[in-house]
Image (tube, grey):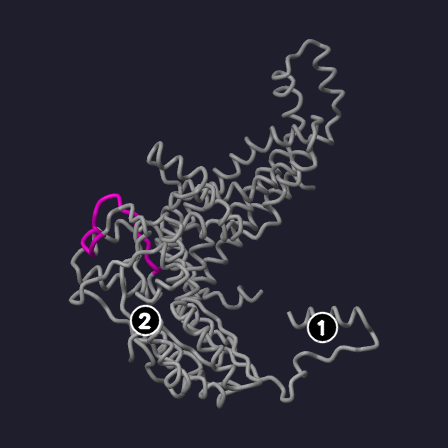
Amino acid sequence: MRRWACLLVAGASLLAGCSDPEGAGATSERALTVSAASSLTEVFTEIGDAFESANPGVSVTFNFGPSDGLATQINEGAPVDVFASASPTWGDAVQDDGPGVTGRADFARNELAILVPSDNPAGIEGIDDLSEDDLRLVLAAEGVPAGDYAREILANAGIAGAALANVVSNEEDVKAVITKVLSGDADAGIGYVTDVTPGVGDQITLVPIPDDVNVIATYPIAVVSGSEEADLAQRFVDYVLGAGQRTLAEYGFLPA
Amino acid sequence: MGLIVRTPWSRIGEIIASETALTALRLSLVVATAAAAISLVLGFPIAWALARAEFRGKTFVRTLVVLPLVMPPVVAGVGLLAAFGRRGVVGSWLYEAFGVQVTFTTGAAVLAATFVSLPLAVLVLEVGLRGLDDRLEDAASTLGASRAYTLRRVVLPLMGSQIVAALVLAWARALGEFGATITFAGNLQGRTQTLPLAVFERLQTDPEAAFAVSMLLIGLAFVVILGLRGRFLR
Protein backbone atom coordinates (compact mmCIF):
# COMPACT_ATOMS: atom_id res chain seq x y z
CA MET A 1 0.00 0.00 0.00
CA ARG A 2 2.68 2.44 0.96
CA ARG A 3 4.51 1.86 -2.28
CA TRP A 4 1.33 2.59 -4.25
CA ALA A 5 0.67 5.70 -2.26
CA CYS A 6 4.24 6.63 -2.97
CA LEU A 7 3.78 6.14 -6.71
CA LEU A 8 0.67 8.29 -6.64
CA VAL A 9 2.53 11.04 -4.92
CA ALA A 10 5.35 10.70 -7.40
CA GLY A 11 2.92 10.86 -10.27
CA ALA A 12 1.19 13.95 -8.91
CA SER A 13 4.33 15.88 -8.31
CA LEU A 14 7.59 14.79 -9.84
CA LEU A 15 9.39 17.61 -8.13
CA ALA A 16 8.40 16.42 -4.70
CA GLY A 17 10.29 13.23 -5.36
CA CYS A 18 9.63 10.03 -3.56
CA SER A 19 11.90 8.58 -0.98
CA ASP A 20 12.25 4.82 -0.78
CA PRO A 21 9.62 3.71 1.72
CA GLU A 22 12.01 1.07 3.10
CA GLY A 23 14.45 3.79 4.03
CA ALA A 24 11.80 6.22 5.19
CA GLY A 25 12.13 5.28 8.84
CA ALA A 26 14.89 6.59 11.04
CA THR A 27 16.49 3.16 11.16
CA SER A 28 16.67 0.74 8.28
CA GLU A 29 14.01 -1.92 8.50
CA ARG A 30 15.02 -5.38 9.65
CA ALA A 31 13.04 -8.29 8.30
CA LEU A 32 12.39 -11.61 9.95
CA THR A 33 10.92 -14.63 8.19
CA VAL A 34 9.02 -17.05 10.38
CA SER A 35 7.78 -20.39 9.05
CA ALA A 36 4.98 -21.62 11.29
CA ALA A 37 2.51 -24.49 11.35
CA SER A 38 -0.80 -23.50 9.78
CA SER A 39 -2.61 -24.11 13.08
CA LEU A 40 -0.69 -21.08 14.39
CA THR A 41 -1.99 -18.74 11.65
CA GLU A 42 -4.27 -16.56 13.78
CA VAL A 43 -2.29 -16.54 17.02
CA PHE A 44 1.12 -15.93 15.42
CA THR A 45 -0.27 -13.16 13.27
CA GLU A 46 -1.33 -11.41 16.47
CA ILE A 47 1.95 -12.19 18.26
CA GLY A 48 3.84 -10.92 15.20
CA ASP A 49 1.99 -7.62 15.27
CA ALA A 50 2.75 -7.23 18.97
CA PHE A 51 6.42 -8.09 18.38
CA GLU A 52 6.62 -5.48 15.62
CA SER A 53 5.09 -2.86 17.91
CA ALA A 54 7.57 -3.76 20.64
CA ASN A 55 10.48 -3.60 18.20
CA PRO A 56 10.17 -0.56 15.92
CA GLY A 57 11.82 -1.01 12.54
CA VAL A 58 11.32 -4.75 12.57
CA SER A 59 8.95 -6.45 10.17
CA VAL A 60 7.94 -10.07 10.61
CA THR A 61 6.84 -12.05 7.58
CA PHE A 62 5.02 -15.32 8.19
CA ASN A 63 5.02 -18.37 6.02
CA PHE A 64 2.18 -20.56 7.28
CA GLY A 65 1.79 -24.10 6.02
CA PRO A 66 1.96 -27.77 6.94
CA SER A 67 4.92 -28.40 9.26
CA ASP A 68 6.26 -31.20 7.05
CA GLY A 69 6.19 -28.96 3.98
CA LEU A 70 7.80 -26.07 5.87
CA ALA A 71 10.57 -28.35 7.14
CA THR A 72 11.19 -29.58 3.60
CA GLN A 73 11.40 -25.99 2.35
CA ILE A 74 13.94 -25.12 5.03
CA ASN A 75 15.99 -28.24 4.35
CA GLU A 76 15.94 -27.33 0.65
CA GLY A 77 17.52 -24.01 1.53
CA ALA A 78 14.62 -21.59 2.01
CA PRO A 79 15.90 -18.51 3.88
CA VAL A 80 13.92 -18.84 7.08
CA ASP A 81 14.92 -17.35 10.46
CA VAL A 82 12.48 -19.06 12.83
CA PHE A 83 10.66 -22.38 12.54
CA ALA A 84 7.63 -23.23 14.69
CA SER A 85 6.35 -26.75 14.09
CA ALA A 86 3.18 -28.49 15.25
CA SER A 87 5.15 -31.61 16.11
CA PRO A 88 8.64 -32.42 17.39
CA THR A 89 9.12 -34.71 14.37
CA TRP A 90 9.55 -31.82 11.95
CA GLY A 91 11.55 -29.79 14.44
CA ASP A 92 13.90 -32.78 14.53
CA ALA A 93 13.96 -32.95 10.73
CA VAL A 94 15.37 -29.43 10.47
CA GLN A 95 17.66 -29.97 13.45
CA ASP A 96 19.14 -33.27 12.28
CA ASP A 97 18.73 -33.47 8.49
CA GLY A 98 18.67 -29.78 7.61
CA PRO A 99 20.65 -26.66 8.47
CA GLY A 100 20.29 -27.26 12.22
CA VAL A 101 18.72 -25.08 14.90
CA THR A 102 19.62 -23.12 18.02
CA GLY A 103 17.62 -22.06 21.05
CA ARG A 104 15.00 -24.76 20.57
CA ALA A 105 12.19 -24.90 23.12
CA ASP A 106 8.63 -26.17 23.33
CA PHE A 107 6.27 -23.20 23.51
CA ALA A 108 2.74 -24.63 23.45
CA ARG A 109 0.58 -27.71 23.44
CA ASN A 110 -2.72 -28.25 21.70
CA GLU A 111 -5.57 -30.71 21.99
CA LEU A 112 -7.17 -32.38 19.01
CA ALA A 113 -10.91 -32.47 18.41
CA ILE A 114 -13.51 -33.58 15.91
CA LEU A 115 -14.82 -30.69 13.84
CA VAL A 116 -18.22 -30.86 12.18
CA PRO A 117 -20.29 -28.34 10.18
CA SER A 118 -22.62 -26.53 12.56
CA ASP A 119 -25.68 -28.29 11.13
CA ASN A 120 -23.88 -31.59 11.83
CA PRO A 121 -25.43 -33.47 8.87
CA ALA A 122 -24.07 -36.85 9.99
CA GLY A 123 -25.06 -36.41 13.63
CA ILE A 124 -21.55 -36.93 15.03
CA GLU A 125 -21.56 -37.00 18.82
CA GLY A 126 -18.36 -38.82 19.67
CA ILE A 127 -15.25 -40.44 18.31
CA ASP A 128 -16.98 -43.78 17.69
CA ASP A 129 -19.37 -42.16 15.23
CA LEU A 130 -16.44 -41.65 12.86
CA SER A 131 -16.59 -45.34 11.97
CA GLU A 132 -20.21 -45.11 10.76
CA ASP A 133 -20.90 -46.18 7.19
CA ASP A 134 -21.10 -43.56 4.42
CA LEU A 135 -19.49 -40.85 6.48
CA ARG A 136 -17.35 -38.31 4.66
CA LEU A 137 -14.31 -37.83 6.85
CA VAL A 138 -11.52 -35.41 5.96
CA LEU A 139 -8.09 -35.59 7.56
CA ALA A 140 -4.80 -33.83 7.01
CA ALA A 141 -2.44 -35.96 4.92
CA GLU A 142 0.02 -38.35 6.50
CA GLY A 143 3.18 -36.51 7.49
CA VAL A 144 1.22 -33.37 8.34
CA PRO A 145 1.18 -33.29 12.17
CA ALA A 146 -2.62 -32.94 12.39
CA GLY A 147 -2.91 -35.91 10.02
CA ASP A 148 -0.51 -38.10 11.98
CA TYR A 149 -2.15 -37.18 15.31
CA ALA A 150 -5.59 -37.95 13.86
CA ARG A 151 -4.47 -41.41 12.72
CA GLU A 152 -2.95 -42.04 16.13
CA ILE A 153 -6.25 -41.10 17.80
CA LEU A 154 -8.29 -43.36 15.53
CA ALA A 155 -5.90 -46.22 16.34
CA ASN A 156 -6.18 -45.46 20.07
CA ALA A 157 -9.96 -45.58 19.79
CA GLY A 158 -9.71 -48.92 17.98
CA ILE A 159 -11.63 -47.69 14.94
CA ALA A 160 -8.74 -47.00 12.56
CA GLY A 161 -9.91 -49.50 9.94
CA ALA A 162 -13.50 -48.32 9.57
CA ALA A 163 -12.75 -44.64 10.08
CA LEU A 164 -9.86 -44.52 7.60
CA ALA A 165 -12.11 -46.20 5.03
CA ASN A 166 -14.40 -43.17 5.43
CA VAL A 167 -11.66 -40.71 4.53
CA VAL A 168 -12.61 -38.89 1.33
CA SER A 169 -9.69 -36.50 1.20
CA ASN A 170 -6.19 -36.12 2.65
CA GLU A 171 -5.66 -32.41 2.89
CA GLU A 172 -2.49 -30.38 2.53
CA ASP A 173 -2.70 -28.94 6.03
CA VAL A 174 -5.11 -28.56 8.93
CA LYS A 175 -6.54 -25.31 7.56
CA ALA A 176 -7.56 -27.11 4.37
CA VAL A 177 -9.42 -29.63 6.58
CA ILE A 178 -11.27 -26.71 8.18
CA THR A 179 -12.14 -25.34 4.73
CA LYS A 180 -13.75 -28.62 3.71
CA VAL A 181 -15.76 -28.75 6.96
CA LEU A 182 -16.75 -25.08 6.56
CA SER A 183 -18.07 -25.65 3.04
CA GLY A 184 -20.21 -28.46 4.43
CA ASP A 185 -18.74 -30.97 2.00
CA ALA A 186 -17.09 -32.98 4.76
CA ASP A 187 -19.29 -34.52 7.47
CA ALA A 188 -16.39 -34.37 9.89
CA GLY A 189 -12.72 -33.58 10.15
CA ILE A 190 -10.07 -33.90 12.83
CA GLY A 191 -8.20 -30.75 13.76
CA TYR A 192 -7.18 -28.78 16.81
CA VAL A 193 -9.51 -27.24 19.39
CA THR A 194 -7.82 -23.94 18.51
CA ASP A 195 -9.08 -24.21 14.93
CA VAL A 196 -12.51 -23.05 16.01
CA THR A 197 -11.43 -19.42 15.81
CA PRO A 198 -13.84 -16.49 16.19
CA GLY A 199 -14.01 -16.14 12.40
CA VAL A 200 -15.49 -19.60 11.89
CA GLY A 201 -16.93 -20.30 15.33
CA ASP A 202 -20.57 -20.10 14.26
CA GLN A 203 -20.09 -22.44 11.30
CA ILE A 204 -18.10 -25.19 12.97
CA THR A 205 -18.99 -27.25 16.00
CA LEU A 206 -16.35 -28.95 18.08
CA VAL A 207 -16.93 -32.49 19.31
CA PRO A 208 -14.45 -33.35 22.06
CA ILE A 209 -12.32 -36.50 21.95
CA PRO A 210 -12.11 -38.39 25.26
CA ASP A 211 -8.80 -37.91 27.08
CA ASP A 212 -7.91 -41.60 27.14
CA VAL A 213 -7.69 -41.74 23.33
CA ASN A 214 -6.76 -38.15 22.56
CA VAL A 215 -3.30 -36.95 21.63
CA ILE A 216 -1.76 -33.70 22.78
CA ALA A 217 0.33 -31.93 20.16
CA THR A 218 3.58 -30.34 21.30
CA TYR A 219 4.88 -27.29 19.42
CA PRO A 220 8.63 -26.62 19.31
CA ILE A 221 10.15 -23.35 18.10
CA ALA A 222 13.78 -22.60 17.23
CA VAL A 223 16.11 -20.30 15.34
CA VAL A 224 17.18 -21.87 12.06
CA SER A 225 20.98 -22.03 11.79
CA GLY A 226 22.38 -19.79 9.10
CA SER A 227 19.80 -17.07 9.78
CA GLU A 228 21.19 -13.65 8.89
CA GLU A 229 19.17 -12.16 11.72
CA ALA A 230 20.00 -14.76 14.36
CA ASP A 231 19.87 -12.29 17.28
CA LEU A 232 16.54 -10.87 16.22
CA ALA A 233 15.25 -14.39 15.55
CA GLN A 234 16.21 -15.43 19.07
CA ARG A 235 14.39 -12.32 20.37
CA PHE A 236 11.26 -13.48 18.56
CA VAL A 237 11.60 -16.98 20.03
CA ASP A 238 12.00 -15.46 23.51
CA TYR A 239 8.99 -13.26 22.88
CA VAL A 240 6.83 -16.27 22.01
CA LEU A 241 8.06 -18.06 25.13
CA GLY A 242 7.44 -14.94 27.23
CA ALA A 243 4.89 -12.25 26.38
CA GLY A 244 3.37 -14.40 23.66
CA GLN A 245 2.19 -17.03 26.13
CA ARG A 246 -0.84 -14.95 27.12
CA THR A 247 -1.94 -14.61 23.50
CA LEU A 248 -1.48 -18.34 22.98
CA ALA A 249 -3.67 -19.02 26.03
CA GLU A 250 -6.33 -16.65 24.70
CA TYR A 251 -6.47 -18.69 21.51
CA GLY A 252 -6.92 -21.91 23.47
CA PHE A 253 -3.37 -23.29 23.41
CA LEU A 254 -2.09 -25.08 26.50
CA PRO A 255 1.22 -24.11 28.11
CA ALA A 256 4.12 -26.37 27.14
CA MET B 1 17.00 -28.73 -15.88
CA GLY B 2 16.90 -28.53 -12.12
CA LEU B 3 14.59 -31.49 -12.08
CA ILE B 4 16.93 -33.57 -14.19
CA VAL B 5 19.79 -32.86 -11.80
CA ARG B 6 17.76 -33.45 -8.66
CA THR B 7 15.85 -36.52 -9.78
CA PRO B 8 17.12 -39.59 -7.90
CA TRP B 9 17.78 -41.66 -11.01
CA SER B 10 18.84 -44.67 -8.96
CA ARG B 11 15.48 -44.68 -7.20
CA ILE B 12 13.31 -43.54 -10.10
CA GLY B 13 12.19 -46.99 -11.17
CA GLU B 14 11.16 -47.90 -7.66
CA ILE B 15 9.35 -44.59 -7.09
CA ILE B 16 7.48 -44.63 -10.38
CA ALA B 17 6.57 -48.29 -9.92
CA SER B 18 5.26 -47.55 -6.42
CA GLU B 19 1.56 -48.08 -5.91
CA THR B 20 0.92 -44.42 -5.18
CA ALA B 21 2.55 -43.25 -8.40
CA LEU B 22 0.92 -45.92 -10.56
CA THR B 23 -2.52 -45.28 -9.05
CA ALA B 24 -2.09 -41.56 -9.63
CA LEU B 25 -0.89 -42.18 -13.19
CA ARG B 26 -3.87 -44.37 -13.99
CA LEU B 27 -6.28 -41.86 -12.47
CA SER B 28 -4.61 -38.98 -14.32
CA LEU B 29 -5.01 -40.78 -17.64
CA VAL B 30 -8.68 -41.53 -16.94
CA VAL B 31 -9.45 -38.00 -15.76
CA ALA B 32 -7.54 -36.25 -18.57
CA THR B 33 -9.07 -38.48 -21.26
CA ALA B 34 -12.59 -38.02 -19.92
CA ALA B 35 -12.10 -34.27 -19.61
CA ALA B 36 -10.72 -34.02 -23.15
CA ALA B 37 -13.61 -36.06 -24.57
CA ILE B 38 -16.21 -33.95 -22.75
CA SER B 39 -14.42 -30.76 -23.82
CA LEU B 40 -14.64 -31.89 -27.44
CA VAL B 41 -18.30 -32.88 -27.26
CA LEU B 42 -19.34 -29.69 -25.44
CA GLY B 43 -16.79 -27.54 -27.20
CA PHE B 44 -17.83 -28.34 -30.77
CA PRO B 45 -21.34 -26.84 -30.62
CA ILE B 46 -20.03 -23.82 -28.71
CA ALA B 47 -17.27 -23.30 -31.28
CA TRP B 48 -19.81 -23.75 -34.05
CA ALA B 49 -22.06 -21.10 -32.60
CA LEU B 50 -19.16 -18.71 -32.14
CA ALA B 51 -17.80 -19.28 -35.65
CA ARG B 52 -21.02 -19.46 -37.67
CA ALA B 53 -23.99 -18.06 -35.87
CA GLU B 54 -24.74 -14.38 -35.40
CA PHE B 55 -26.35 -13.53 -32.14
CA ARG B 56 -26.41 -10.73 -29.62
CA GLY B 57 -23.87 -10.95 -26.85
CA LYS B 58 -21.50 -13.11 -28.85
CA THR B 59 -18.47 -11.22 -27.58
CA PHE B 60 -19.76 -11.70 -24.06
CA VAL B 61 -20.16 -15.43 -24.57
CA ARG B 62 -16.69 -15.73 -26.05
CA THR B 63 -15.20 -13.85 -23.11
CA LEU B 64 -17.06 -16.13 -20.73
CA VAL B 65 -15.79 -19.23 -22.50
CA VAL B 66 -12.18 -18.10 -22.41
CA LEU B 67 -12.35 -16.84 -18.83
CA PRO B 68 -11.32 -20.14 -17.17
CA LEU B 69 -8.04 -19.96 -19.12
CA VAL B 70 -6.92 -16.84 -17.33
CA MET B 71 -8.58 -17.60 -14.01
CA PRO B 72 -6.27 -18.75 -11.21
CA PRO B 73 -7.09 -22.47 -10.84
CA VAL B 74 -7.81 -22.04 -7.13
CA VAL B 75 -10.48 -19.51 -8.02
CA ALA B 76 -11.91 -22.02 -10.47
CA GLY B 77 -11.99 -24.54 -7.61
CA VAL B 78 -13.74 -22.10 -5.30
CA GLY B 79 -16.24 -21.34 -8.05
CA LEU B 80 -16.92 -25.03 -8.62
CA LEU B 81 -17.35 -25.48 -4.87
CA ALA B 82 -19.86 -22.63 -4.82
CA ALA B 83 -21.74 -24.30 -7.66
CA PHE B 84 -21.39 -28.01 -6.99
CA GLY B 85 -20.44 -28.24 -3.29
CA ARG B 86 -22.94 -29.73 -0.87
CA ARG B 87 -24.15 -26.22 -0.07
CA GLY B 88 -23.59 -24.98 -3.61
CA VAL B 89 -26.21 -23.64 -5.98
CA VAL B 90 -26.47 -26.83 -8.03
CA GLY B 91 -24.83 -29.11 -5.47
CA SER B 92 -27.40 -28.57 -2.74
CA TRP B 93 -30.18 -29.41 -5.19
CA LEU B 94 -28.39 -32.56 -6.35
CA TYR B 95 -27.84 -33.57 -2.75
CA GLU B 96 -31.41 -33.02 -1.63
CA ALA B 97 -33.09 -34.43 -4.72
CA PHE B 98 -30.84 -37.40 -5.42
CA GLY B 99 -28.58 -37.73 -2.41
CA VAL B 100 -25.64 -37.18 -4.75
CA GLN B 101 -22.56 -35.37 -3.52
CA VAL B 102 -20.18 -34.34 -6.29
CA THR B 103 -17.20 -33.25 -4.20
CA PHE B 104 -14.54 -35.84 -3.34
CA THR B 105 -15.48 -38.03 -6.32
CA THR B 106 -13.55 -38.84 -9.49
CA GLY B 107 -16.40 -37.05 -11.27
CA ALA B 108 -15.42 -33.90 -9.42
CA ALA B 109 -11.84 -34.27 -10.63
CA VAL B 110 -13.13 -34.68 -14.20
CA LEU B 111 -15.37 -31.65 -13.77
CA ALA B 112 -12.46 -29.55 -12.51
CA ALA B 113 -10.25 -30.69 -15.39
CA THR B 114 -13.00 -30.10 -17.96
CA PHE B 115 -13.62 -26.62 -16.63
CA VAL B 116 -10.07 -25.57 -17.44
CA SER B 117 -9.60 -27.55 -20.66
CA LEU B 118 -12.89 -26.71 -22.40
CA PRO B 119 -11.77 -23.18 -23.38
CA LEU B 120 -8.74 -24.56 -25.20
CA ALA B 121 -10.89 -26.98 -27.16
CA VAL B 122 -13.35 -24.22 -28.07
CA LEU B 123 -10.60 -21.85 -29.19
CA VAL B 124 -8.90 -24.41 -31.42
CA LEU B 125 -12.17 -25.63 -32.93
CA GLU B 126 -13.44 -22.13 -33.53
CA VAL B 127 -10.29 -21.19 -35.42
CA GLY B 128 -10.63 -24.39 -37.42
CA LEU B 129 -14.26 -23.71 -38.30
CA ARG B 130 -13.45 -20.16 -39.32
CA GLY B 131 -10.74 -21.42 -41.63
CA LEU B 132 -13.23 -23.72 -43.30
CA ASP B 133 -14.74 -22.35 -46.49
CA ASP B 134 -18.45 -22.24 -45.69
CA ARG B 135 -19.24 -22.39 -49.42
CA LEU B 136 -18.43 -26.09 -49.16
CA GLU B 137 -21.29 -26.48 -46.72
CA ASP B 138 -23.54 -24.40 -48.97
CA ALA B 139 -22.60 -26.55 -51.94
CA ALA B 140 -23.38 -29.71 -49.98
CA SER B 141 -26.79 -28.40 -49.01
CA THR B 142 -27.66 -27.28 -52.56
CA LEU B 143 -26.87 -30.83 -53.62
CA GLY B 144 -29.51 -32.00 -51.22
CA ALA B 145 -27.39 -33.05 -48.25
CA SER B 146 -29.02 -32.70 -44.87
CA ARG B 147 -27.23 -30.64 -42.22
CA ALA B 148 -26.29 -33.74 -40.25
CA TYR B 149 -24.94 -35.37 -43.41
CA THR B 150 -22.94 -32.26 -44.26
CA LEU B 151 -21.52 -32.18 -40.76
CA ARG B 152 -20.55 -35.83 -40.88
CA ARG B 153 -19.23 -36.09 -44.43
CA VAL B 154 -17.92 -32.60 -45.13
CA VAL B 155 -17.12 -30.63 -41.99
CA LEU B 156 -15.77 -33.29 -39.66
CA PRO B 157 -13.33 -34.85 -42.18
CA LEU B 158 -11.97 -31.40 -43.05
CA MET B 159 -11.64 -30.57 -39.36
CA GLY B 160 -9.68 -33.73 -38.56
CA SER B 161 -6.41 -32.12 -37.54
CA GLN B 162 -8.11 -29.36 -35.53
CA ILE B 163 -10.17 -31.93 -33.70
CA VAL B 164 -7.05 -33.88 -32.82
CA ALA B 165 -5.26 -30.69 -31.81
CA ALA B 166 -8.21 -29.65 -29.63
CA LEU B 167 -8.29 -33.07 -28.03
CA VAL B 168 -4.58 -33.14 -27.30
CA LEU B 169 -4.42 -29.59 -25.95
CA ALA B 170 -7.45 -30.19 -23.76
CA TRP B 171 -5.94 -33.49 -22.64
CA ALA B 172 -2.60 -31.89 -21.80
CA ARG B 173 -4.22 -29.06 -19.86
CA ALA B 174 -6.41 -31.53 -17.98
CA LEU B 175 -3.38 -33.66 -17.18
CA GLY B 176 -1.69 -30.72 -15.50
CA GLU B 177 -4.73 -29.50 -13.60
CA PHE B 178 -3.99 -29.00 -9.91
CA GLY B 179 -5.51 -26.01 -8.16
CA ALA B 180 -9.16 -26.54 -8.99
CA THR B 181 -8.87 -30.25 -8.30
CA ILE B 182 -7.34 -29.98 -4.83
CA THR B 183 -9.75 -27.20 -3.87
CA PHE B 184 -12.91 -28.78 -5.23
CA ALA B 185 -12.36 -32.53 -5.55
CA GLY B 186 -10.02 -33.13 -2.62
CA ASN B 187 -7.04 -35.44 -2.48
CA LEU B 188 -7.61 -39.18 -2.12
CA GLN B 189 -5.46 -41.88 -3.62
CA GLY B 190 -7.26 -43.74 -6.40
CA ARG B 191 -10.20 -41.36 -6.44
CA THR B 192 -9.07 -37.78 -6.83
CA GLN B 193 -5.29 -37.86 -6.36
CA THR B 194 -4.02 -37.22 -9.88
CA LEU B 195 -0.28 -37.04 -10.68
CA PRO B 196 0.11 -33.32 -9.90
CA LEU B 197 -1.58 -33.83 -6.52
CA ALA B 198 0.66 -36.82 -5.85
CA VAL B 199 3.70 -34.65 -6.62
CA PHE B 200 2.45 -31.98 -4.25
CA GLU B 201 1.77 -34.40 -1.41
CA ARG B 202 5.12 -36.13 -1.88
CA LEU B 203 6.97 -32.82 -1.90
CA GLN B 204 5.99 -32.23 1.72
CA THR B 205 7.73 -35.33 2.99
CA ASP B 206 9.88 -36.93 0.28
CA PRO B 207 11.09 -34.29 -2.19
CA GLU B 208 13.16 -36.84 -4.13
CA ALA B 209 10.03 -38.85 -4.89
CA ALA B 210 8.30 -35.63 -5.93
CA PHE B 211 11.10 -34.93 -8.40
CA ALA B 212 10.79 -38.44 -9.81
CA VAL B 213 7.00 -38.25 -10.23
CA SER B 214 7.41 -34.79 -11.81
CA MET B 215 9.76 -36.33 -14.37
CA LEU B 216 7.09 -38.93 -15.12
CA LEU B 217 4.55 -36.16 -15.73
CA ILE B 218 6.95 -34.20 -17.94
CA GLY B 219 7.88 -37.34 -19.85
CA LEU B 220 4.24 -38.12 -20.49
CA ALA B 221 3.48 -34.61 -21.76
CA PHE B 222 6.68 -34.64 -23.86
CA VAL B 223 5.79 -37.88 -25.60
CA VAL B 224 2.27 -36.69 -26.38
CA ILE B 225 3.36 -33.33 -27.77
CA LEU B 226 6.12 -35.00 -29.78
CA GLY B 227 3.59 -37.38 -31.29
CA LEU B 228 1.28 -34.49 -32.07
CA ARG B 229 4.00 -32.44 -33.77
CA GLY B 230 5.00 -35.35 -35.92
CA ARG B 231 1.52 -35.85 -37.25
CA PHE B 232 -0.50 -32.71 -37.04
CA LEU B 233 1.46 -29.62 -36.16
CA ARG B 234 3.92 -29.46 -39.00
Q: Eyeballing the image, is A90 above or below A169?
A: below
Q: Observer-nearest residue: A72 or A30?
A: A30
Residue shown at the point (75%, 25%) measured from the top left: B133
In the rendered image, which quarter contains the N terminus of chain A? bottom right
The stretch of residues the image draws in magenta is A125-141
Find disc 2 in the rendering and name its residue.
A252
Relative side of A234 to B134, left or right: left
Q: Nearer the viewer, residue B20 or A142?
A: A142
Residue B102: which quarter of the image? Answer: top left
When the figure is inspected, residue A86 is found, relative to residue A168, above or below; the finding is: below
Q: Could you classify mark 2 by the number of other residues whose Cα lies within 10 Å: few (under 14), some (14-19), or many (20 or more)?
A: some
Residue B208 point in image, percent of width and height: 44, 66
Q: Chain of mark 1?
A: A
Amino acid type, residue under disc 1 in the picture: Cys
Residue drawn at point x = 41 percent, y = 61 percent: A199
Q: Which residue is mark 1?
A: A6
> Residue B112: which disc?
none
* Circle count: 2
